[in-house]
């Protein structure tokens, strides 16, 4: 059997790894560059402040930005209390056991469910059975369920990293568990919790499959939580898929990508500061 | 404090605990409600026409009451397998390079970059595929361009960030003493990685691959944009393909009656596949955690 000298083997492998890593990084950077290069020239104040006209061929994307914001807001309004509450229960009010196992299993499974299944579910429950119709409310609630696992997981990590000594001191001063949680634990865990919330905002903004069947794709200004409306991601999908207007598609994609990158960067910055403060 | 006051406090604390438990059960309840709704909508038609009709039927003509999902099941499996062939070697190589072979500074810069890119919406990946990859395949290899190959490549790229960051985390979790022990025995870096580090990180890496697989099989919009969506079993990697997810998304907007039920049946099959993957990934990462805490 042919045996290669381990040193030569080591050299070949490190070049190979270097090469494969470069491919991965270059491809990912390429995607970003193409979107920004073609999209940035489309951006202008007008693009951001005018409503789409002629099915998106003309005008801007204002109504889709607002729809995205409202939808995300509703999703956070519902998912944050549920997620943080779950995390508090798991870390402060119970010991590891069968119940926590079931709750964690549920959250992890929920995280793995494809968005199209959430879309189907939201369509049947919110749009049809509860008769909310295609609306901001239906879309927001569906998204809330989608981001719930992320908020649970990040809040749990944040609460767990609060030092035990804080709690002991609070208890020794005669506080109840709830006082300890609200006055001592949560305030120190807030930055971590906010990080999770911001991450979920990024996910909500980019979601398409779950939103298109629950919020609809009507191209008009959202006036109430019951109006059907089209988010940025759905707008981009329709512009690109049906070949309505490539310049507008690139412009929308650029706004989408820039906002998500900005959100992720903010998360990174906050986490960095949070970790620094900790140590 | 009087004993009466303490009692009151205890009572309210118990109440708080109970309400928190209710909130904590929300995730499980949502999971249960989703399962019930999807199955309630999808199962009746599966039993009416027979499981065989759905799982092994090759013809999808909803208007003629023919609901064969075999082309879509095969389609989903093909593109997912293709995505793994492309995404896993690239992802593992990048993770190994960044943890074991590159300088700390380079890795410190590239890991966040890769994680930032994980946030790019799937529609954007699909769009890039449509604009660059599809024409490239059409001109170089022939066929319509919209194909199994295009979908596999796009999905392979999409799962890269997931595979890379989970693999990096599990490789980093391997204690340095393992590496030092191996190096002290005269092993080269690569030998150490291959024979000590990777085996120790194995279950975490497998969990990452399975999660990537789940993402690939569940992806919808990006696949619709590049796969061509013909409801036939693809004869080659250059032929168009329709996945389970695309089948739902393409027809949901106008389906009604039994057609709609059949789309929910598609959802049921997808749901079962994903739950199996989740459970396997869960078991795999639990194994890693157990090993980690045992040290």
Image (cartoon, coloured by chain):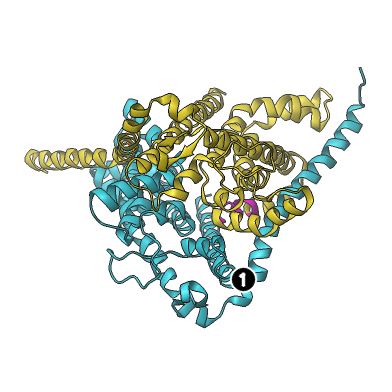
Chain colours: A cyan, B yellow
Closer-to-camera residue (A37/B191) = A37
Residue annotated with mark 1: A39
> From the viewer's perspective, is residue A29 above or below residue B99?
below
Look at 52% across and 75% down and name the residue there.
A57
Chain at tag 1:
A
Q: In screen coordinates, is B39 left or right of A40?
A: left
Residue B24, quarter of picture:
top left
Which segment is the magenta one? B113-120
Q: Residue at x 56, y 24 (%)?
A: B291
Q: Which residue extends farthest front?
A: B64
Residue B254: % across, % down: 39, 52
In percent of width and height, residue B187 lies at: 82, 26
Which residue is farthest bottom? A46
Q: Secondary structure at mark 1?
A: helix
> What is the magenta segment's predominant secondary structure?
helix
Based on the picture, tell me whether residue B117 belongs to the magenta stretch. Answer: yes
Q: Is residue A198 above or below residue B107?
A: below
Above or below, B75 against A221 in this view is: above
Quadrant of res A246: bottom right
Place of residue A255 in the rendered image (x, y in percent of width and height, measured from the top left)? 54, 69
- Residue B136 lies in magenta, yes or no? no
Q: Quadrant of the N terminus of chain A?
A: top right
At horizontal 60% and vertical 47% (from top left) the residue drawn is B227
Q: Is residue B30 visible?
A: yes
The front one of B285 and A248 is A248
Of the pair A86 and B42, the residue shown nearer to us: B42
Residue placed at 59% from the left, 54% from the top?
B126
Q: Position of residue B105 (x, y in %)?
A: 72, 52
């Amino acid at each position: 059997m042919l045996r290669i000298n381990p040193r030569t083997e080591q050299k070949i492998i490190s070049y190979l790894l270097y090469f494969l890593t470069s491919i991965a990084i270059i491809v990912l950077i390429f995607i970003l560059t193409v979107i920004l290069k073609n999209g940035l020239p489309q951006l202008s104040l007008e693009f951001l402040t005018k409503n789409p006209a002629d099915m998106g061929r003309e005008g801007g994307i204002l109504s889709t930005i607002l729809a995205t914001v409202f939808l995300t807001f509703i999703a956070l309004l519902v998912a944050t209390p549920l997620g943080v509450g779950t995390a508090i229960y798991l870390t402060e009010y119970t010991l590891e056991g069968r119940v926590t196992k079931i709750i964690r299993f549920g959250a992890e499974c929920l995280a793995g469910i494809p968005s199209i299944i959430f879309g189907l579910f939201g369509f049947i429950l919110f749009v049809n059975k509860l008769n909310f119709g295609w609306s901001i409310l239906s879309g927001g609630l569906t998204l809330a369920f989608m981001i719930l696992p992320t908020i649970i997981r990040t809040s749990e990590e944040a609460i767990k990293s609060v030092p035990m000594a804080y709690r002991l001191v609070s208890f020794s001063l005669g506080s109840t568990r709830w006082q300890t949680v609200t006055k001592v634990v949560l305030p120190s865990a807030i930055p971590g919790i906010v990080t999770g919330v911001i991450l979920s905002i990024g996910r909500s903004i980019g979601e398409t499959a779950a939103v298109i069947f629950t919020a609809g794709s009507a191209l008009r200004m959202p006036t109430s939580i019951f109006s059907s409306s089209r988010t940025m991601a759905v707008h981009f999908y329709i512009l690109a898929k049906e070949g309505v207007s490539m310049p507008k598609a690139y412009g929308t994609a650029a706004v989408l990508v820039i906002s998500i990158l900005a959100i992720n960067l903010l998360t990174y910055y906050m986490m960095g500061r949070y970790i620094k403060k900790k140590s | 404090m009087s004993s009466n006051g303490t009692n009151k406090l205890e009572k309210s604390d118990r109440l708080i605990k109970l309400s928190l438990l209710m909130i904590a059960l929300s995730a499980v309840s949502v999971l249960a409600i989703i399962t019930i709704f999807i199955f309630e909508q999808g199962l009746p038609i599966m039993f009416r026409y027979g499981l065989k009709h759905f799982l092994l039927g090759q013809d999808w003509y909803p208007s003629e009451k023919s609901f064969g999902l075999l082309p879509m099941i095969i389609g989903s499996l093909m593109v997912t397998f293709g995505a793994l062939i492309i995404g896993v070697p690239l992802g593992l190589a990048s993770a190994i390079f960044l943890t074991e072979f590159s300088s700390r500074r380079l890795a410190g810069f590239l890991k966040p970059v890769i994680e930032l890119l994980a946030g790019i919406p799937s529609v954007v990946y699909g769009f890039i595929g449509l604009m660059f990859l599809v024409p490239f395949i059409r001109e170089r290899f022939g066929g319509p361009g919209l194909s199994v190959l295009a979908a596999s490549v796009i999905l392979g790229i999409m799962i890269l960030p997931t595979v890379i960051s989970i693999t990096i985390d599990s490789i980093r979790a391997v204690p340095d003493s393992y590496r030092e022990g191996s190096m002290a025995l005269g092993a080269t870096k690569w030998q150490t990685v291959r024979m000590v580090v990777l085996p120790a990180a194995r279950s975490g890496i497998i969990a990452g691959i399975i999660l990537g697989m789940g993402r690939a099989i569940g992806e919808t919009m990006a696949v619709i944009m590049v796969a061509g969506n013909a409801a036939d079993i693809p004869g080659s990697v250059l032929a168009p393909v329709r996945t389970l997810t695309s089948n739902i998304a393409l027809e949901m907007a106008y389906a009604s009656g039994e057609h709609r039920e059949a789309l929910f049946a598609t959802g049921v099959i997808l749901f079962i596949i994903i739950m199996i993957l989740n459970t396997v990934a869960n078991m795999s990462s639990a194994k890693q955690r157990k090993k980690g805490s045992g040290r």
